[in-house]
Image (cartoon, rainbow, N blue to C red):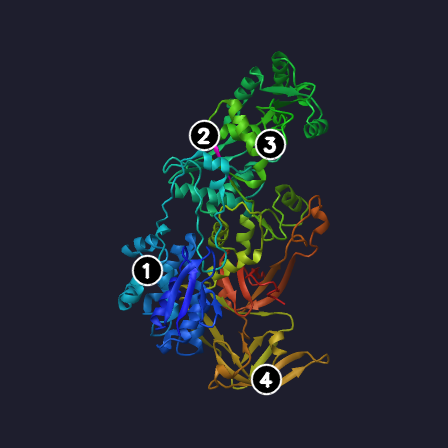
Amino acid sequence: MTLKIAFAADNPPLSVIAAAKLAGAEHSLDSSLHSGSSPSLIFPDGSQLRGAYVLLRYFARTAKCSDFYGQDALEASQIDEWLEYSPVLASGPDFETACTYLDNYLLQRTLFVGYSLSIADIAIWAGLAGTGQRWESLRKSKKYQNLVRWYNSVSSEYSTVLQEVASYVPKKGSGKPTATKSKETDQKGSTNGDIAGKGKAGNKSTFEVDLPEAEIGKVRLRFAPEPSGFLHIGHSKAALLNQYFADRYQGKLIIRFDDTNPAKESNEFVDNLLKDIETLGIKYETVTYTSDYFPQLMEMADKLIREGRAYVDDTPREQMQKERMDGIESKRRNNSIEENLELWKEMIAGSERGLLCCLRGKLDMQDPNKSLRDPVYYRCNPIPHHRIGSKYKIYPTYDFACPFVDAYEGITHALRSSEYHDRNAQYHRIQDDMGVKRVHLYEFSRLNMVYTLLSKRKLLWFVENGKVDGWDDARFPTVQGIVRRGLKIEALIQFILEMGASKNLNLMEWDKLWTINKKIIDPVCPRHTAVISERKVLLTLTDGPDKPFVRIIPRHKKYEGAGEKCTTFTKGIWIDFSDASSISEDEEITLMDWGNAIVKKIVKDGDGNVTQLEGALHLQGSVKTTKLKLTWLPDTNELVDLSLVEFDYLITKKKLEEGEDFVDVINPTTKREITAIGDSNMRNLKRGDIIQLERKGYFRCDVPFLRPSKPIVLYVIPDGRQQSLLR
């Protein structure tokens, strides 16, 4: 029976092809599928299987070598774990982190599972080989000796097959960009196409789009946040895309604070934005401020007035907005240059007369694009500036300052979210009027998340009204907030880069981000034990140890780097009420990290709730025969008090409709705390440590152990599942 493996030519499933060959399956290859398609296995009768890991498992189960999918159910499950882990090798920023983890794992192992080659080895081998030159460069270094030893051993032993499979690695994997030379491509928009990742785990994110007229070594970009709040997940996309293109073109990236609105800005926000930028791993050349260029901006405004390209207008704001919408020229539009200069002086002085005025560009009040209808360049604002005090009474608008400072600082390409699309023509028209060099604009879609507000004005409302504890609250979409909740920056980077610079407006699910996060933390985070305090049940083991004893066991059975912990064994042990309620009399259960026991007696109160259990150890029993595998804690005074904190979304609606007030959909209950007891090893946790509480989920330590009377505070880390982890 000849099978056909169908796949997209730009993303060949190396692991599947290798597995088919090593399994001795008769097959042919068909690379005609569309880009982004999952690989398929087509049988002679027309039936199909789809997905790389489905195909891997099929070939493993039908292989002539019987151990290809492990020797038993345990090894098969371990192989499945490695299949789930292997996609991390395809996510650019996590590649070396993954290599470090794999290298440590192979310190005392020959293969990933058991003592025979399995599809786990094939999946990891394919993940490394598929990165092309990136892995080859690391392979020549001495950085990952255990991983290289394993890779060379597998490659050598199965050289005939694997050398042939490696030839399918796309040559574009070198990662060298091709600079575009044609202005025409920018005008047609072809250079601003999607560079989205291919979505499902296991597929590589690819970046096929070039910056217009970019030259290697000459690209200069800027990330320009306004210091009026903390950096949030939406800003992160802009920051990381700037970093990506700077790296790709061996260019420079600067950080510029767009500080033109003293009413909203502060040094506190500047400091925290720099902290967030560092957290994201953004490498920049220098930090500048729009306020550094206030003198030059005022000179430019004066020049435009004298050239008749700008005028001072005292039309009331609401009337001005209506006139712009209707294409009606201001009565001040045709004032003389002398009249405009006189009013300009009044604005600079912040006089009573000047405070009524603004400076507008004289562009085109009849243009269909309303952003070109005489936009405002300067407004009066007597509020002191956070950097330069009360020196100025007027401040430039973003629309005026940005095109000037971009050109002045030599920015070659300005990345802007697609919400600014209608203002791109204005940006270039203003640069033309100023007589400065045009800067290329590059659009990408704004990142929107379900049940999430990203407007700094709305986030500030939550802070000022005490709905959250601050900008770093774990319910906030700020970088500091989501990190505090337990998100690894590697997961955020992978999530954002998988989207690429797409212009498609997508409403993204948080579950996808937290699923990526779980794949990063699960292989390495230490395991601990907790029991919910409410109605916890004491199980007395009649033949348990009369004198407590201690064993040293790993904090993570598959990752030695997690260290060790002490586990105390006693006659009396605590278990969760929910677990106790699931046990039947004379049922054999498994006590994790100890062995089996048989529950002989169940004591209940008048309401039928379990209050006590009595049983006996049955350590010779098989864990395979028990239905319940339970966590437990020794009945000692060494246990620590815990506060397990779970959060919910701040609003109850996935997406606000146009004009809908967010206050109307505020979630009344966004925080839930549960008291628990935990193993004594948690006294050593530090703030920021991430752990797994066995059978309860993942947690980040927000408040470590200080004294017995104060509980350790652990924040629940979502793992991509909808249901609560604590109910």
Q: Residue 532's x, y, as percent?
A: 60, 69
For marks 3 and 4 on the same chain, the one whose residue lies earlier in the sequence: 3
Q: Residue 22's x, y, as percent?
A: 34, 71
Please tell me which residue is depicted at 43% across the width and 39% down the height of the picture.
284
Callout 2 amino acid: Glu
Residue span colored magenta:
438-442
Residue 262: which disc? Answer: 3
Alpha carbons under labels 1 and 4: distance apart = 60 Å
Q: Determine whether the residue tagged by mark 3 lies in a helix, strand or loop.
A: loop
Residue 614: which disc? Answer: 4
Q: Which residue is mark 1?
A: 166
Q: Determine whether the residue tagged by mark 4 lies in a helix, strand or loop.
A: strand
For marks 1 and 4 on the same chain, the one whose residue lies earlier in the sequence: 1
Alpha carbons under labels 3 and 2: distance apart = 22 Å
User: Image quadrant of residue 367?
Assistant: top right
Alpha carbons under labels 2 and 1: distance apart = 45 Å
Q: Is residue 705 visible?
A: no
Q: Is residue 572 above or below residue 280?
A: below
State which mark lies toward you, 1 or 3.
1
Please tell me which residue is depicted at 46% across the width and 68% down the height of the picture.
54
Q: Main secondary structure of the magenta part?
A: strand
Question: For this view, does 413 lie left or right of residue 721?
Answer: left
User: Image quadrant of residue 122?
Assistant: bottom left
Alpha carbons under labels 3 and 4: distance apart = 69 Å
Q: Residue 247's x, y, as percent?
A: 40, 43
For marks 4 and 2 on the same chain, the one whose residue lies earlier in the sequence: 2
Callout 4 amino acid: Glu
Q: Which residue is mark 2?
A: 409
Q: Residues within 10 Å of mark 3 (few under 14, many from 20)?
A: some
Alpha carbons under labels 1 and 3: distance apart = 58 Å
